[in-house]
Image: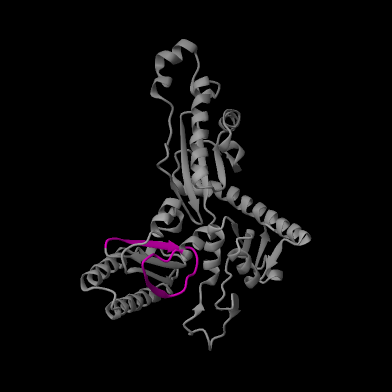
Amino acid sequence: MDSNTLTPDVLRELRTPRPYPAVSLTMPTHRRDPHNEEDAVRLRNLLAEAGHRLEADPGVGRRARAAVRSRLGRAVADIDPRRTLDGLLILADAEDYGIWYLPREVPERVVLSDTYLTRNLVAATAQSRPYWVLGVAADRATLWSGSGESLHEHRGDGFPMSPPKESWDVEREERIGDTPSTFSDEETRRFLRSVDGAVGTVLSRRPRPLHLVGLAPALALLGEAGNAATHAAAGRLVKGGLAGGPAPVLRKEIQPVVEDHARREKNEVLTRLDEARGRRTFAAGLDEVWESVREKRADLVALEERFRRTVRICDGHLVPVDDETAAWPDVRDDIVDELVEAALDGGAEVVFLPDDALAGHDRIAAVLRY
């Protein structure tokens, strides 16, 4: 799996308590040769560390230990080097395992607990800026899930959609002298209304920016017929023949639209931060933002994509650590991912910005609710 497949239901399942030990293994990876040859060695070492931890833990019985080690071995065997990104997350317990390819660097660690470690996965998902693409034609509608460099067709929630077959029979066409492709047929309107309703349901459960693709008449009729899909659209590509993909072609065509939305989002976020400073509902720097997130006062958290910080928590505050103290047991080397997960859980909006966009605010800032 990759972070693009993380849904609220999947996250809820991953956070469900399970029989001890649930093993979470994270490590940074490389996308290309020759550096990705190091990944195999690092993974073997990390797997060996997990084995030693399982052997040394008195709370792990022999049968559970064997089962977990078996699942870890199967997970490692299933890793596809061609899909490697910037981080790898392996989750395994006595019954199941999962592999996640993350577009965000993560620390090297092994965690044994009664739940899986999810903060790196949540942060990577937020950074990858997932989005939806709705392809619209007179006789078909498809929904595509995009994130970072990936795009794949979403098959579920009623998609792909087509009008009822009886609406398209030859006798009907001869009787009224019209075809649905003209976008003037009432049954086409009803079809697009149903498409709009289905997209609205998806957006209510998995809110993301939505981009529309189709011929101008189809998009215009969709705007007249519906509400959710049209009003929530972050971008439009007026071009036909893309409802059926294929994914690489559609991704190439939609990429400028996605990038334009990202630029507009950056400007809007910076404007919101400036306005918050004037209202004194503003926090900047890791420690201030951390405190506002813990108190659930953060409405928007903005941070740079490559922002990382290793800290200790002392009296409720974050204290940066140097190389000499980095090995201390209370050091948190993924505190930024932890903050992102806590912010999202607290109902805050989290936006990743290009590097140096927040250089004057120690790489991270927030708009506060009060």
Tell me which residue sits at (40%, 41%) in the image: 156
Q: Is residue 225 above or below residue 251?
A: above
Please state the total of marks drawn on the protein image: 0
Q: Residue furthest top?
A: 175
Q: Residue 188: percent from the left, percent from the top? A: 50, 24
Residue 335 in the figure: left or right of residue 15: right
Q: Give the quarter of the image for residue 167.
A: top left
Residue 330 in the figure: left or right of residue 75: right
Q: Give the quadrant of the N terminus.
A: bottom left
Residue placed most toward the observer, 107 or 215? 107
**100 within the magenta span:** yes
Residue placed most toward the observer, 177 or 273? 273
Residue 299 in the figure: left or right of residue 98: right
Q: Is residue 180 above or below residue 300?
A: above
Looking at the rendering, the stretch of residues picked out in magenta corresponds to 95-118
Tell me which residue sits at (71%, 70%) in the image: 360
Q: Is residue 24 above or below residue 2?
A: below
Q: Residue 67: percent from the left, percent from the top? A: 24, 67
Q: Give the quadrant of the C terminus.
A: bottom right
Q: Residue 64: percent from the left, percent from the top? A: 24, 69
Q: Residue furthest right?
A: 278
Q: Residue 227: percent from the left, percent from the top? A: 58, 34
Tell me which residue sits at (48%, 63%) in the image: 103
Viewer can see residue 194 = yes
Residue placed most toward the observer, 241 or 4? 4
Q: Residue furthest left?
A: 63
Q: Give the quarter of the image for residue 298.
A: bottom right
**44 within the magenta span:** no
Viewer can see residue 242 = no
Q: How is the image coloured?
A: one colour
Residue placed most toward the observer, 10 or 271? 10
